[in-house]
Amino acid sequence: MGNLYGKVAIITGAARGQGAAAAHLFAAEGAKVFLTDMNGEGAAVAEEIGSDAFFMQHDISDESGWSRVVAAALERFGKIDILVNNAGIYRPATLQNTDRNLFDLHYRVNQLGIFLGMSAVVDVMAKTGKGSIINVASGAAMRGMPGTFAYSATKWAVRGMSKCAAVDLAPLGIRVNSIHPGVIDTPMIEVNGQELNAVFTTLIPFRRLGTADEVAALVVFLASDAASYITGAEIAVDGGAIL
């Protein structure tokens, strides 16, 4: 019996990378998974998993879309135990090269979307007196990172929102934690280019990039009852990166 047997999870940004890896591992650990993504390729991930998975195309910055996701998850699986706010965007730019549109794009996806997701599941989880929300922030929310102004700003916000939500929701039995992946070998970092990613590797004591499966393993732990007394934590999964 898996560590998530009988649980139901919503995982956003599940079409590829960390979200897809989490979806596969959650299912392997016994959970039923409701996958969402703007990218319709998430349907293929759900098909790979089988009858314990369902996919819905979803813009996380749309409040009404969250209402539809929660309603569909309840209709399909009957409850919601876990929310993994994984969806995000990364468009690196310095402050000088960040305009209002770029900043607003990061805000709507990386910050507003996570706020809306947490808000959407609170009442459902509160009815059972138990729930786990895992917000995917970034190693960029643990330190100042050059050339990532809007991205880092929103990930710092995720860190703060998670801390505050953990306090607000603890009386309802809902745990909220943030995870902080470093440079993970997923399609998201392709925008950096091979040369810059190679430089990042030299700043990691393990001298390699992380994998989506390594991030997923942490998410599974925080979603499980083994983490029942962990809330408000911010856990880096970055290979000990020194930048």
Image: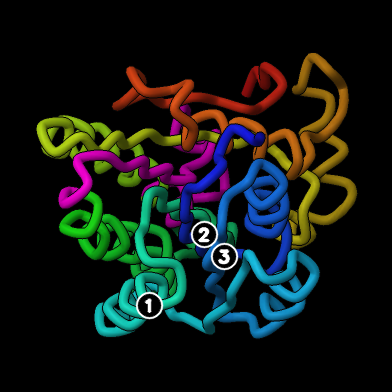
Instruction: Classify 152 as above or below 46.
Output: above
**Which disc, if any, is residue 158?**
none
Q: Nearer the viewer, residue 15 or 50?
A: 50
Say which residue appears at 34% left-offset and 45% top-offset. 158
Q: Secondary structure at mark 1?
A: helix
Q: CA distance from mark 3 to mark 1?
A: 21 Å
| Image x and y of residue 55, in percent | 58, 77
The quadrant holding residue 133 is: top left
Q: Count up the numbered dots.
A: 3
Q: Nearer the viewer, residue 131 or 100?
A: 131
| Image x and y of residue 36, in percent | 53, 72
**Which disc, if any, is residue 75?**
1
Q: Secondary structure at mark 3?
A: loop
The amino acid on which the numbered mark 1 sits, given as a three-letter code, is Glu
The amino acid on which the numbered mark 2 sits, given as a three-letter code, is Ile
Front label number (3 vs 1)? 1
Kindly check if marks 3 and 1 are in contact, taking CB atoms under 8 A apart as contact: no
Say which residue appears at 56% left-offset and 74% top-offset. 37
The amino acid on which the numbered mark 3 sits, given as a three-letter code, is Gly
Q: Earlier in the sequence, mark 3 or mark 1?
A: 3
Q: Which residue is denoted by mark 2 in the rendering? A: 11
Say which residue appears at 73% left-offset and 42% top-offset. 184
**Which disc, if any, is residue 13?**
3
Quadrant the C terminus occupies: top right
Q: Which stretch did the figure color magenta?
A: 126-153
Is residue 45 shown in magenta?
Answer: no
Rendered image coloring scheme: rainbow
Kindly check if marks 3 and 2 are in contact, taking CB atoms under 8 A apart as contact: yes
**Residue 95 visible:** no
Quadrant the N terminus occupies: top right
| Image x and y of residue 178, in percent | 41, 36
| Image x and y of residue 101, in percent | 39, 78
